[in-house]
Amino acid sequence: MIYRIYSLFVGILLLFSTSIYSLEVIEILGGKASEIPIAIVPFEGLNNTGGQKAHQIISSDLNRTGLFRPLNTSGISNPPSSDININYTKWSAIDAQFIVVGRVESENSFSGNIKITWSLIDIFKEKTVVTMRYIGKKSQYRAIAHKVSDNVYEHLTGSKGVFHTKIAYVKKVNNKKYSLNVADFDGYNSRPILNTTQPIISPRWSPDGEKIAYVSFEKKKPVIYIQNLKTGKRTLLANFKGNNSAPAWSPDSRKLAIVLTYNQNSQIYTINADGTGIKQLMRSNAINTEPSWAPNGEDIYFSSNRGGNPQIYKININDDEISRVTYEGKYNLSPSISYDGKLLIFLTNDQGKFKVAIQNLISNQVLKISEGPADESPIFAPNGHLVLFTYKDYGKTTKIGTVSINGLKRLPINVGSSIIQEPTWGPITN
Amino acid sequence: MEELQLKKSLLLLSLVATLGAGCSSTPLDAPADPSASNSNYYGVDAATAEALGLEELRGNQLLSQRSVFFDFNKYDIKPEFQDLIGAHAQYLNNHEAARMIIKGNADYRGSHEYNLSLGQKRSVAVKDALNALGVDDAQIETISYGEEYANQECQADACGQDRRADITYEVE
């Protein structure tokens, strides 16, 4: 079975696979689950010159999720590079439940491509879970390592990994220069897609992966643009009187929920992605903003102070029925819904400290997963297992990081020393 | 070749002389003579300045106050700003051609979008107060900057500076 995907990899070869393991993520919400101990053995052969090595990239990826505990393998003598002659007793002794082994070679002497052959091995069951080979350009070394992480993740959790996805965020330099940047999910390979002298907020990646909608203050007031990532071209989606802000894509990427004011307070509207068919969703004297479209296409979550302080509500766009969603805490903002519709994350003011909270929408159990004091902009990873958010480093400079939904791992994403804010996360693509 | 260079330097000399003469005839710190020119502070003609009552706008002590401040997460107008709002209402009522833009702001705490809405609520609160004093809606535009131009490192009371609505006039 050979896959050839030229956009990213020259080839993928699946050599061996057993059935997929499965972890019920809803059950582990609450941080009670123990992390799976896994050893990523240094890959034999060619190494990424100068940069991180494959086993380091994979360890770092899995560590972020809060579901794995990568083990230190430096004390292991004669580490294996394939699933042949594995000393299971030795790996059991360091409590490894799974190990990943591999080797990096030249594909052949002409192409300049590399091939990475790797195996995921179950130490308890003493058998190989999967063996695969990736072939790609040398420049795709990190991308191939992320692809290994994705496969390990999917085999052991039953859910797709997000290690091969992209994020976007706003970089602010000296209050004078703003740029919208796209990068790998871990901050590598960043590039600006927009440079301006005025603020940019609320970028939102379309679920089909093709566009980013955002709010710009270039026209001396907030207006909404949609930028095509392939062509770089952008169109003005909304430039009505007053403010135009808070774009939120529908699951089919055809519509957006937006917030307009005209000469009054913020109200939520829906509009087609081509700027036609504007429709007011609700009318109230309170603030209604931060729409987030649920994956069922019918519910739009939003924040509103209709009850006094801001709380999260949802409106069904078919019957216009509005119901309150958050009850814990006096000040809840910035809803984001997981791609399966089962989890809600939001920003909560916990006695003056702004933290990220997660709510199971079935049981309504709430867990605070960040510590504050000035966290903001929580947004779900496309598999709903990680949250991207901003925090103030040493109380000063705003930075981005991820937190696992069980709250166990909060780790920074390093994209330089500038102020980094308002992140968004792109979809899983092949 | 030499001749050309000489011509160039002569040209430069005459240019310097002209500039020098210009400077000596109108010193930079001389007060402008309002009767001698139809331009003014805002670069509009005399008729427009008259219609907009620019002298009053510039000279009136209350009208020169432009910021209304609010409490955290609040948008109700405090009594101490009634005089300021009353003066601007009177000005707008007396000058139908005047156009006001109210720009709401919020401190950095909370989300960018919610703060944009909060800033808007503040600018609308000022507009509503003006409306109550008889000002026509068509004379006022309300927008918000949210926390985008706020001090991102303020502590406690200092953040109050960012919780405000700023009154501006189109002509400015």
Image: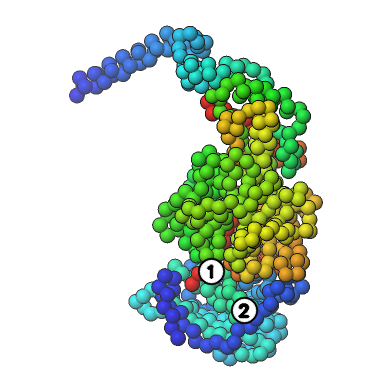
The residue at 64%/68% (across/down) is: A341
Looking at the image, residue A240 lies above or below residue A253: above
Rate crowding at label 1 as few (under 14), some (14 to 19) or many (20 or more) other CA atoms within 10 Å. Answer: some
Q: Which residue is mark 1?
A: A428
Left or right, A89 with respect to A195, comes to right
The residue at 48%/15% (across/down) is: B46
What amino acid is at disc 2? Gly
Q: Which residue is mark 2?
A: A158
The residue at 42%/70% (across/down) is: A7
If you read the primary sequence from the N terminus, does the residue marked by circle 2 or circle 1 appear first? 2
Cα distance between the residues tagged 2 and 1: 15 Å
Quadrant location of the N terminus of chain A? bottom left
Front-most of A384 and A265? A265
Q: Residue A44 location, x and y as percent? A: 52, 79
Front-most of B40 and B83? B83
Q: Number of marks in the image?
A: 2
Q: Residue A316 location, x and y as percent? A: 64, 61
